[in-house]
Amino acid sequence: MELTQQLLEMPEWSDDDIVRHQLPIVDTPFVSVGGGMGSLAMVDTLRIAGQPVESLTVLAENAIPSETYEHLANNSQIPRHERLRSDSSSTMDCIWGWPGYALREAVADKKIGPAATVFAEPILANYYTPKAGQVYESVRREATRIGWDRMLRTGIVRTVRRRREGGYFVIHTPADQSGAVPGGPKQRVVYRCHHIHLAVGYPGVKMLGDLQAYREEHQDWRRVVNAYEPHLHAYEEMLRRPCTVVVRGSGIVASRVLQRMIDDRDQRGAQTRIIHLFRNYPDGPQGDKATFRRPVLAGWAKQGFNFPKAAWGGQLRNDLESLEGDERSKFIDAMGGTNTAPRKDWEEQLERGAREGFYRQLIGTVKSVVPAEGNAGIRTVIADRQGGESFLDADFIIDATGLEAGIEEHRVLRDLLQYGGARKNVKGRLDVERDFTVRGTQSGTGRLYASGSITLGGYYAGVDSFLGLHYAALRIADSLAENGFGKKIGPLRSTSQWWKWARNKPI
Amino acid sequence: MTPTLFGRIQTRIIMMATLGVIWTAIIGPVLPRPSVDGESISLGNMYKALYLAVVVVTVVGVVWELIYHWIQQYRWEKDWPTIYGLVVAINEGIVAYLILNAGLFWDERPPGQSFPLPAFLIMFVTLWLIIWAFTNGPMQILSLRWRFRGGRFDPNW
Ligand SMILES: Cc1cc2nc3c(=O)[nH]c(=O)nc-3n(C[C@H](O)[C@H](O)[C@H](O)COP(=O)(O)OP(=O)(O)OC[C@H]3O[C@@H](n4cnc5c(N)ncnc54)[C@H](O)[C@@H]3O)c2cc1C
């Protein structure tokens, strides 16, 4: 039978409700929804803590944990051989963080370079960062080792609801619909579980308001593109003929897009002219005191990672944990905000571009985006700082601001806000405790946890990063242990499990 | 590394109390022994001197950690780069030796006899490298949460 409107409008379900709707029930103690990097970190930690595969279920759209990541990375111009933006010990496949990616790369390639970089960073060298391909391969190996496929059920999670008798129900639409009646309702499975972990990644990408308005009004998805969406056609056209491109945003995504365009100029004969439009142009170091100062170079705020390192596990993590409300939100912005990584090759390209005139920076607020008169381009109308108005015509506009959609865009999260007792935090994301329990969603002794970007604005800044996902996983595992699900990983278990990991022995 | 002040102090004390004590026991017998009146000092006296050095490096180290923590405040990342962890061995080694050589009140050295420098140097440098290497990786195997807690071992997150 199909889900009824009446059922969907009940804030809590009982076992009887599900039976009455003739939905098949599968019992499982723990469900992780998403099946991306966050779910991998979670079940990896729980498997290492001693949970058998039978106790854990991963409900995912994709079969491989790094699939969505790889898709977004490819779109934003990070192919497999390019280096990412996290450090050597942010090892997606290893909860211990050692040996890091640098040491492994040094051993595999028989080169001292990567290990020497870690030794000298960030004083004598920029931070070491691993190649995308190395991370993907390590993820696959670890997923295989922990029996990922045996925990995985592919499909789409539709709803998460509290169960009257405690715990939760998860409505799942399996990818394999062979059991559904042709033309009839979708085949569904209801997972009845005690605890849930949500790691659904980004609810969606968001365009800048003026660009979105232009796209919708003129039905033009070709010339105004978002860096997180596929937009190879733009680079291909830049190779065919000289183009003018407006880039919006000045964070890491913008750096990648600019590198791609300038690499194509340098290596493949493109003649792209780039106009880089800044809304805010920092022209001096950021921060309010000598002990809190971030360097700025030519309008770009620079730091190794999206937050200062100590936000993941040092004094800045402690500082943030003690803040509430607006203060917390402001501190997250002060540590993060728009910033990019210091990389000599990027700085060289942009300096050369400015000198030779193919890269130009402009500051202004966009008033509107309209089709350009006379030719096929797009016109950006800008109010400059003096209050004057000017315009820029371009062949493409690339939105590299990396904006994310609100959490309501995701059906499961919207539903949780409406019926599940979840609330939004100061940044409009899911309000979580320090241990990543979603506030207000407790169901009997069952707990609902979340990790990843949907929890930004909470007590931990680096939630949307490999290391942050591991941090969340460990805190959640500890919290689960306190609630009677499994045991905390102590020194002996940690060591013996690491030894297994090191020899790639399945668990 | 991204230590907090408490993390620094806890890590220092625990490392010296474990690796420091064990390594000193291992290396003690093979270190060059100074001689008094033409005769090498006994292994027992050698250990006394070496363990005194361990205590001094630990106690004075807590003061050093305060200074490092202050320096760290001027770093945006609030981190302690790997290389700093090695470089500070120089200042620490010099100061620890000067203190040991100046003589502490329980010191039983005959007057005029300096604290055995070659033995101190070998022990200090090797121990430093061991602790440095250990805290830059393998530590995380034993203590999974250590890196997230800024180097603290106490059970609070
Ligand atoms: C381009 C880019 C580069 C990045 N680079 C780095 C880096 O270098 N270092 C770093 O530490 N971090 C980096 N990050 C940040 C972060 O580590 C990644 O975004 C990471 O993938 C986040 O993991 P996640 O589990 O939250 O989301 P994802 O890995 O995206 O996984 C979420 C999964 O949930 C699935 N899902 C969503 N809704 C449902 C549903 N209803 N039913 C079933 N499945 C569902 C999605 O299909 C998706 O596969 C980067 C992010 C981006 C976008």
Image (tube, rainbow, N blue to C red):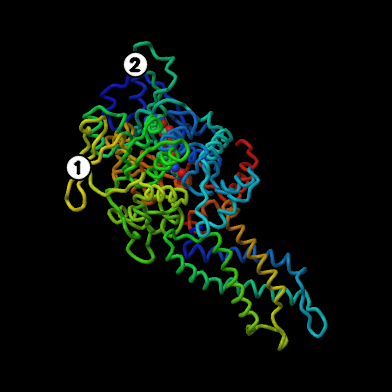
Q: Where is residue B148 in the image (x, y as percent from the top left)?
A: 48, 54
Does A155 sit above or below residue A468? above
Chain bearing mark 2: A
Image quadrant in which the C terminus of chain A is located: top right
Mark positioned earlier in the residue sequence (1 or 2): 2
Q: Nearer the viewer, residue B122 or A78?
A: A78
SS at circle 2? loop
Residue that mark 1 sits on: A367
Q: Quadrant of ligand 1?
A: top left
Residue at figure coordinates x 33%, y 57% from the top left: A323
- Marking on residue A493: none
Residue at figure coordinates x 81%, y 85% from the top left: B37
Label 2 environment density (alpha carbons within 10 Å; few <14, some 14–19, many ≥20): few
Image quadrant in which the N terminus of chain A is located: top left
Q: Nearer the viewer, residue A24 or A148?
A: A148
SS at circle 1? strand
Q: Is residue A121 left or right of residue A206?
A: right
Residue, far right: B38
Residue at figure coordinates x 72%, y 73% from the top left: B119
Q: Where is residue A110 in the image (x, y as percent from the top left)?
A: 65, 46
Residue that mark 2 sits on: A185
- The amino acid on which the numbered mark 1 sits, given as a three-letter code, is Lys
Does A262 sit above or below residue A241? below
Label 1 environment density (alpha carbons within 10 Å; few <14, some 14–19, many ≥20): some
- The residue mark sitting in front, 1 or 2, is 1
Q: Is residue A184 shown to the viewer in this render?
A: yes
Residue, far front: A356
Chain bearing mark 1: A
Alpha-carbon span between mark 1 and mark 2: 47 Å
